[in-house]
Amino acid sequence: MTDYWIAPSILSADFARLGEEVENVLDAGADIVHFDVMDNHYVPNLTIGPMVCKALRNYGIKAPIDVHLMVSPVDRLIGDFAEAGASIITFHPDASTHVDRSLQMIRDAGCKAGLVLNPATGLESLKYVMDKLDMILLMSVNPGFGGQSFIPSTIDKVREVRALIDASGRDIRLEVDGGISAKNIAEIAAAGADTFVAGSAIFNQDDYQAVIDTMRRELASV
Ligand SMILES: O=C(CO)[C@H](O)[C@H](O)COP(=O)(O)O
């Protein structure tokens, strides 16, 4: 049976009470924290850096923190996030000049490493670095903002990447991010994803537990 992970994106959380928000969503049954780092350069938005990741650790958050770097260049931030308590660090291959080196830097820093593909980006960058990947994140929206609609062509892409992962024989998480809700999570899981980033679908509701329970019921039906 697949070990599904629900990963709330803090992009839609109330930043004025971020520690409490993250604690509440984990208490409600989330598995990991999805930490969206945007630089107003690689993506047209500006969010948070390593100091906020460290603040979450100091607040007492013990769950894995899945740091999604939507920044260019990438390498300068890897060590800072590892020191700040990141568990997984993912980045976009088109944002790094030397993708293999960036992946190795993440692993050397003691974190799990992953690549993120935008909706229009093909799978070529995965082929020669599968042995350095712990996670592949497929964006199902164009990165930069929460609350966008899921791009349907992602479903075929999930199937293709699932086949690549299975052929590699490696334990690589397949994460999907953008426009995920209880309405489409089962279809995305059936295509082969095992990790689901959801921001607005969770944080825009009052009862996080109810949303996550509904998502789990949907996943149990796959
Ligand atoms: O990385 C992101 C956007 O770049 C967000 O994580 C993503 O869009 C999640 O938000 P939502 O569930 O509201 O679509």
Image (tube, rainbow, N blue to C red):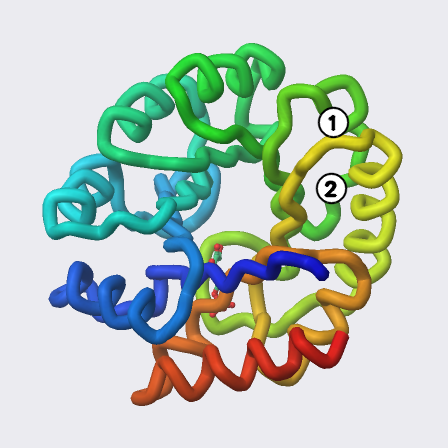
In 3D space, how far apart are the residues under numbered discs 1 and 2 (Cα atoms)? 9 Å
Instruction: From the top left corner, tell me how far across and down residue 108 is, in percent.
Output: 44, 13
- The residue sitting at 81% across, 52% down in the picture is 157
The tag on residue 121 is 2
Horizontally, residue 185 falls left or right of residue 75, namely right
Q: What residue would you read off at disc 1?
A: 125
Contact (CB < 8 A) between labels 1 and 2?
Answer: yes
Residue 192 occupies quadrant: bottom right
Q: Is residue 60 left or right of residue 188?
A: left
163 relative to 137 in the view: left or right: right
- Give coordinates of residue 162: x percent, y percent: 80, 47
Give 22 or 124, whichever is nearer the viewer.
22
Name the image quarter holding residue 122. Answer: top right
Residue found at x 64% / y 84%: 183
Please identify, in this view, whether the residue under mark 1 or under mark 2 is nearer the observer. Answer: 1
Q: From the viewer's perspective, is 212 left or right of 158?
A: left
The amino acid beneath tag 1 is Ser
Q: Residue at x 57, y 77 (%)?
A: 216
Q: List x then y, in percent, for residue 212.
A: 47, 78
Is 29 rendered above or below residue 126?
below
Would the CB of label 2 be found within 8 Å of ligand 1?
no
- Image location (x, y in percent) of residue 7: 46, 60
Asked if 214 appears above or below 3 in the picture, the reply is below
